[in-house]
Image (cartoon, helix red, strand yellow):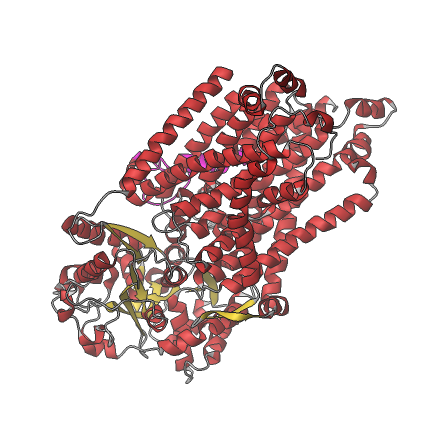
Amino acid sequence: MITTTVQRWLGAFALLVCIFSVSPVLVIVLESFTATDYITFPPQGYSFKWYLEFAKRSEFIDSAIVSLVVALVSCLISTLIGTLVAIAIDRKTFFGKSFIQALFMSPLSLPGLIFGLALLQFLAGNGLPRNIYTLTIAHIVLTTPFAIRFISVSMLGIDPNVEKAAKSLGANGLRTFWHVTLPLIRPGIAASLVFIFILSFDEVAASLFISSPNAMTLPVRIFVYIDQNYDPLVTSVSSLLVLAAAIALSIIEKTVGMGRLFGLK
Amino acid sequence: MTQAPLISNEDKKYRGAYFLNQYLLLLPGLVLFLLFFIFPMAVLFENSFHDFSRMSGIIPGLTFKNYIKILGDSYYLEICLRTIKLALMTSVTTLLIGYPVALYLVSASARKRAWIILFILSPLLVSVIVRTFGWLILLGSNGLLDNVGQAFGFQLGSMLHTQTVVIVGLANVLLPFMVLSITTSLQTIDPSVVKAATSLGANPWRVFTKVIFPLSLPGVFSGILIVFSLASSSFVTPALLGGSNFKVLSSVIYEQAMVLQNWPFAASFAVTLMVIVLGILALQRRAIEGGKYKVVFH
Amino acid sequence: MKNALLKFHRHIAKTALVLTALFMGVTLVHAQLPGYESEVVLAGYGGTYEQFTRNQIITAFEKVTGIKVKLVVGTALSNYSKVVSTKNNPEIDVYWSNELTHAGGKQLGLYEKLDLKIITNMADMYQSAKDPDNIGVVSHVQATGFQYNSAKFKEAGIAPPSSWNDLADPRLKGKVALYNFSVAFSQDLLVILTKQAGGTEKDVRPGIEKLKALKSSGNLAYFASSPAELDNMLVQGQAWIAVNGGPRAYILKDRGAPIDFAVPKEGGGFFANYFDVVKNAPHPKAAQLLVNFLISPEVQLIIAKDVIAAPVNRKVVVPESMREKILMGEEKISKLIRIDRNEMNRQLDNWADLWARELEGKR
């Protein structure tokens, strides 16, 4: 589409932008190995001491566990609910279909901050506590739209003749679903599980409002710490989040591919 | 996404997954969303119409007091305008940075494309708190810029707490969305159209301005919309990079709710923020459906 | 790819089961000290406070009682808002409050009476540290004054600050930093300046005018939202003087930073912190035990030494080297400027509005 000289300039620019894009993450990981007691970049000296310090802090370990558990439960339940909804939506129009579709997609256009605030006021107003259960519910609500999207897209790609064939061979609805449809939407389910896990693990805005002393996710714990302190400890904690992202990235790349996941060809 | 369904409605009648009534399937999701989405939003909306006092909490009785306070007070109006301005400038910045990248992405080789996608999209998997903290380290005291400056004899100190820094941080966080949006749009352009324009004698610049860019407008607009709404509601980045000297709507919401316990007032700011975002969405709809590029969007 | 996905599914299922089991196991662990809960939640302060609270106080308490302490970190106000907003389902057991939030919470009925059967150390506390209704107890007293960069002052040939009016010294143009209004010290400063101008808590506009003058003259240049931010500004030399509590300044000084603390001759601000037990706390008995531990002579000394403030337990023996820095005894404490906290609670929102609009807003 474009001449080679223009292409070269664009390429150089794209390279710079790529560096710009990953630099903050790189900085954090590098800084986590600093030997100094304060934050300075480039780091001076190299040491694992901040990782050792991280391991000693029970509040960060607790938060890591909370984040892990919430993310795991969220991705499982979100994907389950999302699959059920996607199956229902995949059918021909029924009463209330477009309203229901809009309803389930609305958390996408709602800032997490506002949802967190709303949920907090709702819980307190009805005498409900903030704990790991309500935190998980918040994450499920926020991530279900993604599950629905991934699985719906997956279902769209299924050739109806396959299912017709199964039916004509005598399989009832449930058997057809279990043995024919389900295996075909496996990519969608896998994408949903991984993506929602990392989404929940990373979530900050809503969790800020719903976290409580006994159930505080790792990103929120980091934010609270940075608010009061400015030392390299949280860089090692943050590196854990980067590691989680890296793992998620490798799983996504091996299965569906980052580009395809986000809708690029 | 308006495209012809891949499966006709007729075929859907025989959809294999026809077990259980669809309402039964939707039930768990509906119950979840009713209890933990609709009800909370209703509570938020209703709370915004209440008064509050430190001594007695939320006062029963509906009133417009909070909204009058927001609209009538120049301090809060300034914050609203500042938020809008920040979001707009972030959108423009990401557009300027992201468009060339998107152009390169659609025209580069598969291998180069894979690398660019990796570098641009993978930060999306890292929490915003980590990415923003990285900027804090880069631009704060003893950060990269400060240390480099000191090596040359400049006492730069911290570059933080200005609008520019917040825009840099936000643009960094939100760039992937703009690139994605424009790229998907560019990918729908039929290359033969471009070839035709070139063969008719148009120089590359004209091909771009008269053919490529107009055809990519849907992506540009949707990118601006996404970045604008995410930037205007962003909390972590303005809080860390902007500090208390650069308050935006989300900072006010947090402060009113979590520090001053004035939930009704916080709720009214939240509603105001939603109105702003929905307003921009409506404006864009009108621009798309009525403007001269109408043809492109259908 | 299908195999990879199947394996992946199995992995997910296994990990999910293990983690769920772990999670359930963790929540079912029982108490160690018979009759007391297995953990207690303390809401305290950040920065250097967090360090000594965790390293010295919490470690000692956990060792002695076996009860795990969860520390919630924030400012007096942000922790207070947590106590208020969760009052139907309290998450915090012991709240380390300041005078203002102690008075406010008491009025709102948020705190529990202290159980003197468990809190035996109360007998050793100064009379002025006890609450007339036995709700909460003072933890320490400090003075609000000037935290300043002594090196910069010396360089510029300015004598150490000795009066509240010194903030307006033209030689300090662009060098004055204050906390933003959500931090107690700035709230108190507003009242102190009002009183210096002859006013009272009923109308703080005289104080606002003084602060506005500081801003328009160019002296007041920075607002900090956290202790770490303010400390940073002073140590770096961006700002030369701030209004803060003594402790923060002395901690930096001990670390070798060129920071010092000065109490104005008109009197520093009286600033006390309290330990309050939250009503319907999730771990009520452990909460009382923790408070007793916190006011014991040993912990009072830890707090006094690390915060660099006056202890309020008679049995505390302060080492010779620290006696000057730490206010001791009724006499010195009586010289500090006291503030009507009930009036402050009534008006705080209005003051916050005034401050935001007249001072911070104009940026």
Looking at the image, residue A102 sits to the left or right of residue A57; the answer is right
- Residue beneath the point at 62% across and 44% down: B227
Observer-nearest residue: A222 or B65? B65
Q: Which residues are magenta?
A: A19-48
Q: Position of residue B120 (x, y in %)?
A: 57, 32
Instruction: Kindly give the residue lying farthest to the bottom in the view shown.
Output: C198
Q: Give whichever of C117, C357 is nearer the camera.
A: C117
x and y percentages locating residue B4 in the rendered image:
75, 29
Left or right of B253 on screen, residue A239: left
Please check the rendered image and state whether residue A42 is part of the magenta-colored stretch, yes or no.
yes
Whether residue C171 is visible, yes or no, is yes
Q: Is residue B204 above or below residue A66?
A: above
Specify whether C286 is left or right of B192. left
State the residue at coordinates (40%, 64%): C183
Q: Could you say which is closer to the camera, residue A45 or residue C144?
A: C144
Within the magenta stretch, is there residue A29? Answer: yes
- Residue at screen point 66% across, 20% down: A159
Q: Hey, which quadrant is residue A30 in on the image?
A: top left
Figure disc tally? 0
Q: Quadrant of the C terminus of chain B?
A: top right
In percent of width and height, residue C212 lies at 51, 73
For residue A67, what is the image quadrant?
Answer: top left
Q: State which quarter of the image contains the N terminus of chain B.
A: top right
Residue A236 in the image: above or below residue B76: above
> Residue A257: in sight, yes or no?
no
Q: Position of residue A33 (x, y in %)?
A: 35, 35
Q: Nearer the viewer, residue B150 or B161?
A: B161
Residue A262, relative to residue A97: is it above or below?
Answer: above
